[in-house]
Structure formats: C-alpha cells, structure tokens
Image (tube, rainbow, N blue to C red):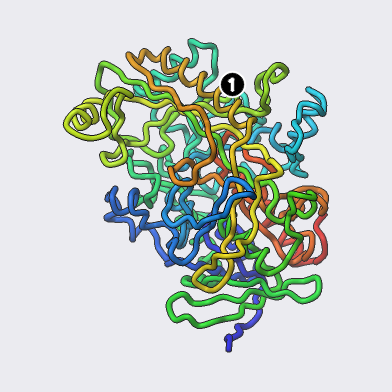
Amino acid sequence: MAKTFDKVDVVTVGVGWTGGIIAAECAKAGLNVVGLERGEERGTQDYQRIHDEYRYAIRYELMQDLSKETVTFRNTRKQKALPMRQMGSFLLGEGLGGAGTHWNGWTFRFLPYDFEIKTITEEKYGADKIKPDFQLQDWGITYDELEPYFDKFEKVAGISGETNPLAGKRSDDYPTPPMKKTPILQKFEKAAQAKGYTPYMLPSANLSEAYENPDGETIFACQYCGFCERFGCEYGAKSAAEITVIPTAKKTGNYELRVHSNVVEILKEDDKVTGVRYIDTVTKEEFIQPAEVVVLTSYILNNAKLLMISDIGEQYDPDTGRGTLGKNYCYQINTGTTGFFENQMNTFMGAGSLGMYMDDFNGDNFDHSELDFLHGGGIWITQPGNRPINSNPIPDDVPLWGAEFKKASIHNFTRSLYVGGQGASLPHKENFLSLDSTYKDAYGLPLLQLTYNFTDQDRALHKFISEKTAEIMNEMGAKEIVEANVLADYDIVPYQSTHNTGGTIMGVDPETSVVNNYLQHWNADNLFVVGAGNFPHNSGYNPTGTVGALAYRCAEGIIKYSKNGGSLV
C-alpha cells in the first residue's frame, strides 16, 4: 500500500538544471515545492577525489545504471530494437544535478533562425526547399521573446563569454569575461580569420573569475585542471544546479529535496494531473505525492517515457503522421579534422569550455540556394585538457596496438589538435520515440524505444562541415591531417554527443506539439514538461543555454498558473 504525502503546490520529477530552476523560482514566489530525484544527493564536497579518469570517464560513475533503466534502439522500423547495455552514443546522467553535473559547460543561445525555421526557410527559398518527410516547424516563440530568459540564465550561471557577431541581439553583456585565449586558441583564431571567418571565445560555464550571482550564490574561478566533461567540479568553478539554483531553492524554506525517488507514474483524473507515484530505490517503498502542479524536469528520454506510461497525450504514428508524443526526435551531426604538428603544445591543461567557435556556416548565416541541405553547424576548437586513457591521437598509417602505437601516441599527445564541427539535426518522420513491447526496466515498466538513423540531409551537411574543418586545419599549419570518415548509418555504440532532443516538442497547435510556449501540456493545464525534448529540431549548438531559458519562462508560467489557473496561451 503506497503512503500518501500531503499535497504540495509543485512537484518536480528530476533535479538537475531544469528541476533546480523551477524549484528556485517557484519557492522564491512562496510556492511549496518538492523535488524528486532518483539518484543520490551530491555536491562539491563529493568531488574532492574526482581526478580519476578510469573511474569517471571510462566507467561512468556519475551516470545512470543501465542495468536498471536504459533504452532500446533500432535504425528503422523493420529492425528489432535491442537494449543499450553499456553507455555509448550519449551519456545519461543520474543524481542531484543530473547531466548538468558532468557537462563541459558550453552555453549557447540558439539563433533567431532556429525559432522560426519553417517560416524563414519558406520565405527565403520557397516551400520546396524543405524535402518530403521532413517535419520542420516553428517553435511557437521567437528569439526576441526568449531573450530576457537567456539573459537571466546566463546571469544565474555566471557565463563567461564575449559577443558573437553572427548571433541574435543581446540586452546585456555576459556577466563575466571570456576565458584565457591560449596559444592554441590563437592559432585557430588566426587561421579562421585568414579564411575570412569570425571566430569568438566560446561561452563558458567554467568561469573566468569568481562571481556572485543575483541569488547570492558564489561560483569560483576555473583552475584549468582539465577534468570537466564526465566529472563534477571540486572547486565549484563549473556552474551547475547543485551550486546555484538548488541552494537558492533550499534557502527559501519552501523546498524539500527527496533523493532515491524514482517516479513511475503521473497520476491523473479527468483533464488534470493529481500528482505522481514513486518508489524509494533503497527501501523499495512506494509513495504518492499529490500536487497542484506536476513538472517533468528529468532528461528528455525519461520525460517522454513517463508521459507514454501514464497515457497522457497521443503517441506519434509515423504511418499517419498523427500524434505528437515521441515525434521529432533529433540528435547532432558531429565531424572534424585531426591535425599533427611539428612542435609540442600544452594540450594537458585546459577546461571543458576553453575554446573558440565560429558561426559562419551555422543556421542560415550563409546562402543555401545551391546546397542540398538546410541549416548548418558551428565549427570549433577546444583545449579541454587531454587525458591519457582517452587521448591517443595517431596518424592513419600507425597500427592500433603494439610498440609503434605506443611511440606514436606518446609523441603526438602534445603535437595534435582537433577542429570540430557540430551540425544541426532536422526532424524526419522515421525518427521518433515510443515504448518497447518486449523489454522492461527494473520496475516492470516498458523501456523507451529509440528509432533513429541519419538522413541524406545529415550526410550532405556532414560532408560540407567536414571540408570546412579540414580547410581551417590546413591553414593552421598541420604537417598531416586526418579527415572525418563519410557518415554512414547511426551507431549507438561509440560516444558522439549527449544532445538528444525532441519527443515532447513545443508549438502553437496541439495537433503538432505536446506543450505550448510556456511548456504547459495541451491535455492537462497543470502539467509542465521541461527540457531539450521541447525542441522541434536541434541546432548547431549545445542545448543547455536554450533549455535554461525555456525553464525560466516555464517557471514564470507556473507562478502565473498558481494564481489564476487555466491555459497560459
């Protein structure tokens, strides 16, 4: 028999960046908030011995336990989906802070073009430019409408950066200056500028200087230790929910955090949700938490799964095109070029967001009239601090084992650089999320099923961006370069990016979206769904900055709803 708690104003499912933002804003407004996190509580004090590459970067100690919860995958509907039994293409976070604990800290704003991609594309190139079976749609909000929320997120997180000349207009500068422009970054900058491009310092959640945010939380200056991605920060210098918004929520006295709490169902009655049912993962006890408002703030895959399991919304059907839940799953198109140099460079110190970026071939910043793809990608170089196990750069003619491999790997550790590109991912009718009919998780619930493959759009964009990265690497003076392989089918085994998007997309019409532009569910006005799952497509950027902005707008909507109820649009 499940124990039922007293009703609260707001319950969030998942406590990372989005759950923390919702909690902080609602608690500051006087609402009583409970945050349910299925992982453990953790913070800066727990990361004091985290410089262990094998434990955290290879064995993924901060990540989700796939023996209890994972996804199944297939490239096409004709294939049988099988479980992802080891971390591969993407890394699912778990524990307080979520994936925002082990991120690198790249913090972008999506381009104005992204939010009105269908309208702008059709106006500029004609409707025929959008290929059949691509489900491109506007987001139901413009960049200008979202700009104040971008600004708020950047100030709470203390983002270090400089103005990007090819991005949308800003109401204010970044709250802290950009990180150090090292000799490696200067080499990239000089080469890009020689080609006529406009590189800028990458906007970074690894802070260039100590900073106190508007809520009174302190984030310290980055030490350039090189342990960012896949690690927590022992200095409190990488902005994350557990050192910003979660402490802010706790200080109000209106917030309760419960860890080891795995939500297995959203409870509903008529056209409202009434709360959630969850299981304590340690004691196996079952609880019900009633709430006036339920907010899904876990990772995009779990948000979609909970809606499906709870039978809220209509599942997307690729045969008919009807339904919205699970629709428009997108990913990211990654490519790049490795260059080998004569002289040694400091490649072992760095930070996750110590880098430069350029948007000359991102969004619609260049003409697509004669190109066989839409959108584009950002081109970048970073100095993240290469670590010895995962960093073995060797030319193509060197064996992958033995004495010759060891010699080349050691020699090139400080003599190789990588210029990367991350391209947009556009929604195709055959790329979607659903429930698996065979495999179940540790609690007896169906696993989420991912059906996804790269498209001809992706392959054309990949080839284009690959060539641009090779041109820049040559300009940088590499004596030898290794270009990216041709893009084949999507493979879930090798790591690529934890930039999964879609499945609970936003928009202006319940026939084509799951939530409105306050992220309020069309089928239940006291249910909100927050995360990169709201993106109708993915851009040539990391998603966190845009997720943060949407979360602040959602929090504003929840506070409005708590006063008046009803639809917010």
The percent coordinates of residue 560 (x first, y second) are 75, 61
Percent from the top left, x then y, of residue 100? 48, 51
The answer to whether one can see residue 106 in this image is: yes
Vertical arrangement, residue 293 with respect to residue 97, above or below:
below
Residue in the picture at 54% in, 19% down: 198
Question: Could you tell me which residue is drawn at 53 percent across and 33 percent down?
Answer: 488
Q: Is residue 348 left or right of residue 316?
A: left
- For the N terminus, the quadrant is bottom right
Say which quarter of the image contains residue 170: top right
Residue nearest the observer in this picture, 260 or 301: 301
Question: Quadrant of the rendered structure where residue 333 is?
Answer: top right
**Which residue shows up at 53% across the image and 57% down it?**
71
List the single residue furthest toward the left. Answer: 403
Residue at the disc numbered 1: 360
- The amino acid pointed to by label 1 is Asp
Q: Is residue 526 left or right of residue 475?
A: right
Q: Residues within 10 Å of mark 1 (few under 14, many from 20)?
A: some
Residue 254 appears in the rendering:
no
Residue 315: percent from the left, percent from the top? Answer: 73, 58
Using the image, determine if residue 281 lies above or below residue 245: below
